[in-house]
Image (cartoon, grey):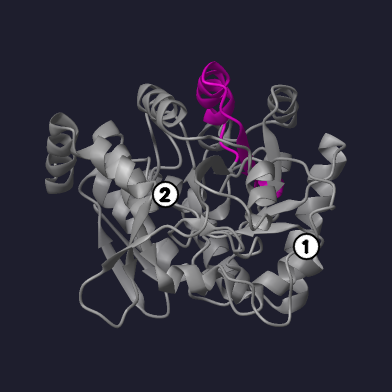
């Protein structure tokens, strides 16, 4: 058990988590970057947390993200008991309303892994949790996982005790254990994210030839369109997450626009409904790049979600939504602690990233709204 889990468990046992939750409804700790210590102030605006998940279930891809169904069930039960859980559509409406008060939480998923249908959907239905799934359109269409998952699979399949690859310089990874192979794949993906997209594709093609993946390693990893439609009937909403999950900031402008518009068009065609919401692949500031919000608006979306950590506030920029990835460690006490921290902490650097920038405005609220669940 980590030190944080021990602290969270102690707070839960002594009632400290409940006290922090009550405090966070009226007060916040403000971190302004100028003072060593935060200062406590009254909450002046409504706060909205958007939780970001990837896969529910264990065993298989993505190796970097798995959450047992029982742990996810406990988290959703906790949210339903302690917070006002709303759809992304409603969250956007309330963000636009200067009179909004209090706290609310929306649940989103990135990518569109198969476990969302087999594991997550029954739990979401059980607890009446609305959700948004951001679909990686090309992977759903082809039935095969994206390039980064192929790298994780390749490193598991690679023969021998070590692996060498050219990434600007020759890199050598020792592979004595499953975890060392996961770590090696994570390092390779991190390096590829820094490259121009054309170079990244070349490296992926070389790796595909060096470590051919068997068909059964690629099959049944992603949602099918029929499963998506079944989830749609259960009032799960869907958004776009590009066609191929590139790093947007590493693309030429025309290619970046194509990734957004083509994913929107394909999902709308398959689901016969408007898709007004988008989530950036990877989602950190360096991955989105300058002009990201303008790109989202230009491609016809009403919202753009990042993975910059923090809670959104009323009046914030719906084209640069903050999201928190706090649920995948599995500990319910730690999840509750992170939820308290999310609402109690006010980080002005993250808040600045979610404010409307000069030269663009959030799409008007009369865009036809269709709630979506995100997948990265």
Q: Do we see residue 206 in this rendering?
A: yes
Horizontal and vertical percent for residue 185? 38, 56
**In this view, 100 is above or below 321:** above
Report whether residue 160 is seen: no
Q: In the image shown, does 220 or 239 lie closer to the viewer?
A: 239
Q: Quadrant of residue 33?
A: bottom left
* Residue at the image point whose x is 67% and y is 42% from the top: 90
Q: Secondary structure at mark 2?
A: loop
Dot 1: within a 10 Å radius of its alpha carbon, few (fewer than 14), some, or many (20 or more) residues?
A: some
Nearer-the-camera pick, 121 or 225: 121
Is 137 covered by the magenta stretch?
yes
Q: Which residue is mark 2?
A: 325
Label drawn at residue 363: 1
Q: Is residue 320 left or right of residue 266?
A: left
Tell which of 296 and 117 is nearer to you: 296
> Going by the image, does 228 lie left or right of 121?
right
Q: Where's residue 198, x and y in %?
A: 63, 73
Q: Which residues are magenta?
A: 112-139
Judging depth in this view, the residue of 298 and 36 nearest the camera is 36
- Residue 299: image location, x then y, percent: 80, 64
Mark 2 Cα shell of 10 Å, populated few (<14), some (14-19), many (≥20) = some
Check disc 1 and report its element: helix, strand or loop.
loop
Please tell me whether mark 2 or mark 1 is closer to you in this view: 1
Question: Which callout, 2 or 1, points at the residue further toward the start of the chain?
Answer: 2
Relative to 22, residue 125 above or below? above
Is 226 placed above or below 112 here?
A: above
Residue 320: say if magenta.
Answer: no
Task: Point out the image quarter for the N terminus.
Answer: top left
Q: Residue at x 84, y 52 (%)?
A: 367
Q: Quadrant of residue 11?
A: top left
């Amino acid at each position: 058990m980590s030190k944080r889990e021990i602290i969270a468990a102690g707070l839960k046992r002594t009632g400290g988590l409940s006290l922090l939750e009550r405090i966070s409804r009226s007060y916040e700790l403000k971190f302004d970057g100028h003072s060593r210590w935060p200062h406590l102030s009254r909450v002046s605006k409504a706060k909205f947390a958007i939780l970001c998940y990837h896969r529910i279930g264990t065993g298989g891809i993505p190796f970097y993200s798995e959450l047992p169904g029982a742990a996810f069930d406990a988290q959703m039960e906790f949210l339903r008991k302690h917070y006002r859980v709303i759809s992304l559509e409603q969250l956007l409406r309330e963000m636009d309303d200067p009179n909004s008060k209090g706290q609310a939480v929306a649940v989103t998923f990135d990518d569109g892994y198969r476990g969302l249908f087999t594991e997550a959907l029954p739990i979401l239905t059980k607890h009446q949790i609305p959700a948004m799934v951001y679909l990686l359109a090309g992977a759903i269409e082809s039935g095969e996982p994206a390039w980064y998952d192929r790298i994780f699979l390749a490193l598991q399949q690679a023969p021998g005790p070590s692996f060498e690859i050219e990434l600007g310089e020759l890199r050598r990874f020792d592979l004595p254990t499953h975890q060392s192979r996961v770590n090696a794949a994570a390092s390779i993906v991190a390096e590829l994210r820094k490259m121009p997209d054309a170079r990244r594709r070349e490296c992926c093609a070389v790796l595909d030839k060096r470590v051919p993946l068997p068909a059964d390693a690629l099959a049944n990893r992603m949602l099918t369109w029929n499963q998506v439609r079944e989830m749609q009937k259960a009032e799960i909403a869907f958004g776009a997450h590009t066609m191929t999950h590139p790093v947007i900031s590493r693309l030429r402008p025309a290619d970046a626009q194509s990734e957004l518009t083509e994913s929107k068009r394909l999902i709308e065609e398959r689901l016969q409904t408007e898709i007004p919401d988008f989530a950036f692949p990877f989602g950190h500031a360096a991955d989105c790049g300058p002009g990201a919000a303008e790109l989202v608006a230009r491609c016809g979306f009403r919202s753009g979600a990042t993975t910059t950590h923090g809670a959104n506030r009323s009046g914030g920029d719906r084209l640069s939504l903050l999201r928190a990835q706090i649920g995948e460690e599995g500990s319910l006490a730690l999840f509750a602690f992170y939820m308290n921290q999310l609402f109690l902490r006010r980080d002005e650097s993250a808040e600045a990233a979610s404010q409307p920038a000069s030269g663009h405005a959030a799409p008007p609220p009369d865009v036809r709204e269709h709630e979506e669940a995100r997948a990265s």
